[in-house]
Amino acid sequence: MSKASHLDSTATGETQPRRIFGTILDQLPSWLPWVLLRLLSGMGVVLALSFIVFAATQALPSDPARQILGPEADEAAIVLLRTQLGLDRPLPIQYLDWFSRVARGDFGVSLDSNVPVSELLARRLGNTLTLLLCVVALSLPLALTLGIVLALWRDSRPARFFITLLILVKATPDFIIALGLMFVFALNLQWLPAVSLMDPDRSPLAQAEFLVLPALTITLGSLPYLIRLVRTAMIETLESEYVTQARLRGIPEQALIFSHALPNALIPVIYGVALMLSVMVGGALIAEVVFAYPGIGSALNSAVQMRDLPLIQGAVLIITLSVVLINLLADFLTVLLTPRLRTAESKVLNFWRRSYRRAVQPDSSRGW
Amino acid sequence: MGSLLPGCGEQSPKSGGASSATALSSSADEKPRRGGRLRLGIIGGDQAGNLDAHKPFNTGSIIRGFALYSKLWEWNDDMLPKLTLAEFAEPNADASQWTIRLKKGLEFHHGKTVTADDVVFSILRLTDPGLASPFSYLVNAVDREGIAKIDEFTVRIAFKKGIGFSPLPSLWVNFGGIVPTDYHPVTNPVGAGPFKYKDFRPGERSLFVRHENYFLNGQPYPDELEILDFKDQTSRFAALVSGQIHLANAVSPDQIALFRDNPRARLLVSPTYAWNGFYLNTAKKPFDDIRVRQAFRLLVDRGELVKRVFNGEGRIANDLYAAHDPTFNHDIPQRLHDPDGARRLLREAGVGKLSLELVTNAAGSNAAVVFAEQARRFDIDLHIRQVDEATYNGSEKADWAISTGGSLGLPYLAAAVSIDGPLAVANRSNFYDARFHDLIHQALKEPDVERQKTIVHEAQRIQHERGSLLIWGFANALDGVSPLVGIQAERSHFPTWRFDRLWLREDTA
Amino acid sequence: MSASLPKRIAPPPHWRLILREPFARTGLVITLAVIVFALAGSWFSPHSPHALLGTVYGAPERAALLGYDYIGQDVLSRVFCGGRSVVWMAAGSVVLALLSGVGLGLLAGFHRGWIDQVVVWWMDVLHAFPHLILVLLVVSMLGRDPGLIVGVTALAFVPGVVRLVRGLTLGVVNQEFIEAARLMGYSRRSVLFVEILPNIVPALLIHAGTMLSWAVGILAGLNFLGYGVAAPAADWGLMINENRTGLLIQPWGATIPAILIALFALGSNLLAEGAARASSRLEEQG
């Protein structure tokens, strides 16, 4: 892998400031096609997924009408509800109908609860984003500190022990971590509420006691991965030629770490955080179920079980949109942080390569 | 770890449990206290449900309905209908007409008086094909054209083709919420129930406030009622013992031991007639042969099923539902575990090694596992297929040879009409017996309980001798209760839903 | 880096080299122990895993060293018999993901052009949908069939494998020795299989170890949510779910299977870790 390759441009030292300044001016318009193309492809992804999920829910062996009406419903009632819901129309027409209404901002009404989907999802998304914000605020500083420490003391005994501990945490299934935290902090010590029964009229941040356990569960699940990214990137940078040169030039170690190595370590961390967030926007299901946290993942899961089409469609749209935006943001941040990429001649050609880099999953090709 | 898991050295429950639990209703002379916000945690599963009085999709919706809507009748402590909003309700001689008169001075949440117009509106709404209520079939026999307002407070109801409908109260009560003529399930969810609507967050929580003009004076007691949805029994238990909720209805039987000697939550046990059993499909081999059906009823070890599936909290049943109904035939001897008899019947039927698929939903899974193990001793291989609710209630439901089943403990005729009788929509076991149908029709026409009794006794004998249900047990309703709650044990399914009776001993935040 | 000779990036680390890593040794021992236990366990099972012997959540006694479960079955017997499905399902989904992912990744990386773009775009589509929900969606649609669960779990891993393989292939394809091989007249296929594939095997093996631990986690999570293998099967994941309510009453029914599953994931993780260390060490030397 060519991860070190973008580092050498910064090694040439003195000409740097002028070059960067110049390139920003020169290249500013040429960002645009790159961003636009990424955005376009992202929208394509969102649309494709929304259609696939739509078609899949229609292919289910049991239809929403029967699922909603439940055990004793007779056929006549089911047929009638199907017509009322418009489920008897051809698939593409149903989809176009849904799409044109979404374009006008109308997400429809949940089949299950009769409540507008937009109202339901807005709140759930808000809760999920707040939770993820806490996770980032918790895990980013932790990952950076621990990653750097582990990189500096790479072969020491405590570091090895700590790494083994992290691998152990990583190997423990999420729900065991969740239940374990609940038993210790809620039932035994009684420091925190067992489940997150938040007051819907107040902001989630104003009732932070409900956020702690779910956030801690997700953080523990993703921390090993992030720490490892930081550590690997730090080691790579510290061993790179330009740091060696800088060291030879007598730049103090501390300055090396914080002004040279750390910025470089940030790039994989951005990708790591983006990857984690994009998985967690819809996939924090286990923490949501255990702590009864009203997030968007459990809303989607329930909607799938209930064949609640408008809710499924709305949730899928929002989740995939978030994933695409998060990835775009991560790419964008990386471009800003990496001089070499900004000055590369052809962003458009480089485009696909950039999009896969994000998840090359540096963790699996490189050790601790 | 030891201190985290206080139960690890404990002996598992015997059949008791009730003993430790009944203690809490000893507060009979204690005066109910006004005020506070009562919190009930329910297992909503994946279905969020709604607020519709006549189309509640799931248990959560039905529970919310208990708070919002009052009915002409309600279930009494013994699971039989008793008058509430109605002061009079009687059928004519052949039960082809009912006359119902409302109490005076009843008020809806928005201040309007409850009148005959509202009753007519409510029954028309429930039976409206356009509403497509899954429960309209219960009162399918009601003739929509034959509903007449006699005066401001009196309504007369007639039935299609003049058939008799003596069990009207027990079939109408569950989904018979009386709502005003300007009712709307989303924008105006108004009823005459003990609590009125304040906030509804689907799949999460719903909030209700006290109905000041509820028809029972001074009731309900709490200022507010909050119903919270959980997906996981363990989390709900944690919420109960840590004081986040006051009540947890329908606790899973394997959690019983958690309540033993627990100062923070007690178990309320209500013996009910919720039946659990298996449908033996008379339209499928080998159950088209009566001898095989009887053999299955003999080979089942009912006591073991009660011990394992209910964790001892229940009683064995005699292949008949509604043992609490006054018309129930208690002279039919209890069928017991009889391996030799079962083997003989199977031999006579020419059945050698049997291999069948036993279809179950999540609720019946444990019973299926235990029964499959029992059947194995008879060279019968029951392969369990667990399906989701949608499939379980789907169009194939009457095609499975054997499937699990169960329902609330409804009175006899109400149960017969919905399970295996002539009007049953979901006759899973395809039981059609001319004499049995005849008897049920006769009983429907008979308003007098004493005369109904002789008819029902014969019908039950038929079900016992050649019926298609293997009913092995009646379950106790188990509810988790905080010591802060004033509550009474009863013989119904819903002591925790009696929102007009429950009260809080002290305020919590 | 002065050599003009064709040089391969990261030649496959020799097994002995991997085993020199303490992480890998520990990992191998743990993984093998769990696999052997899972495969051979049923021979040592004292009772049938379905026999109804004790009381609901009965405490451990001489006849049942780990007590009884939610319905009175012997926990120890079910532990002995319940590993097979976990092992084959986890391994199956990893193998399936590797086969399809490597195929697509090679295709994309080797041909580049529009094929590449199409593959990568579809991987973006797959990646944008939460894994767990994807599995739940399909399982709730088509039933709790073990084969199906394996298939969908694999599907969730495919984008990761494709990205890895494609990236490595692009790297290798640009190396001089591939150019040289082509110039020497080797066919595309032989270039692909003789030159490229061996070069990406080490990274793949490492990734496979990581995926194995993910698979174990996903399968356990599925069981937790009630969508895994169905009763009455003896299965570690299912056992955790069945006996979860008894966690505070008779903990062994849920904790022992959980520990075994965690050990399995730990072992495969450590193995991947060790292999990765060996590989990077080799790179440093070369």
Image (cartoon, coloured by chain):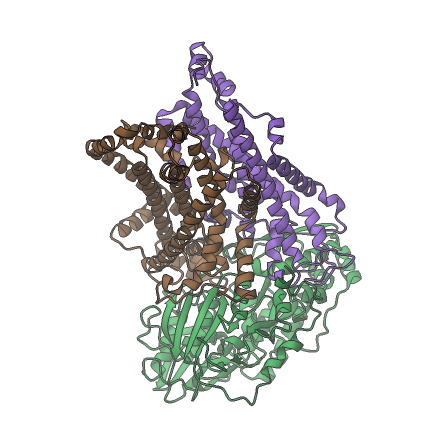
Chain colours: A brown, B green, C purple
Question: What residue occupies the far front of the structure in this picture?
Answer: A250
Decide which of B13, A140 is in the foreground and name it: A140
Compared with C94, A304 (above or below) is below
Q: Is residue A351 above or below residue B84?
A: above
**What residue is shown at x 35% (from left), y 59% (from top)?**
A123
> Split into 4 quadrants, where in the image is the N terminus of chain A?
top left
Q: Residue furthest right?
A: B340
Q: On the image, which quarter does residue A8 sit in?
A: top left
Q: In the shown orientation, is residue C283 left or right of residue A245? A: right
Name the image quarter holding residue B18.
Answer: bottom right
Question: B213 above or below B45?
Answer: below
The image position of residue A244, as x and y in percent, is 41, 29
- Residue at the spot 77% in from the left edge and 55% down from the top edge: B347
Quarter occupied by residue B342? bottom right
Return the residue nearer the eye: B358 or C220. C220
Residue name at image x 64 percent, y 65 percent: B6
Residue B374 visible within the image: yes
Would you say B384 lies left or right of A352 here? Answer: right
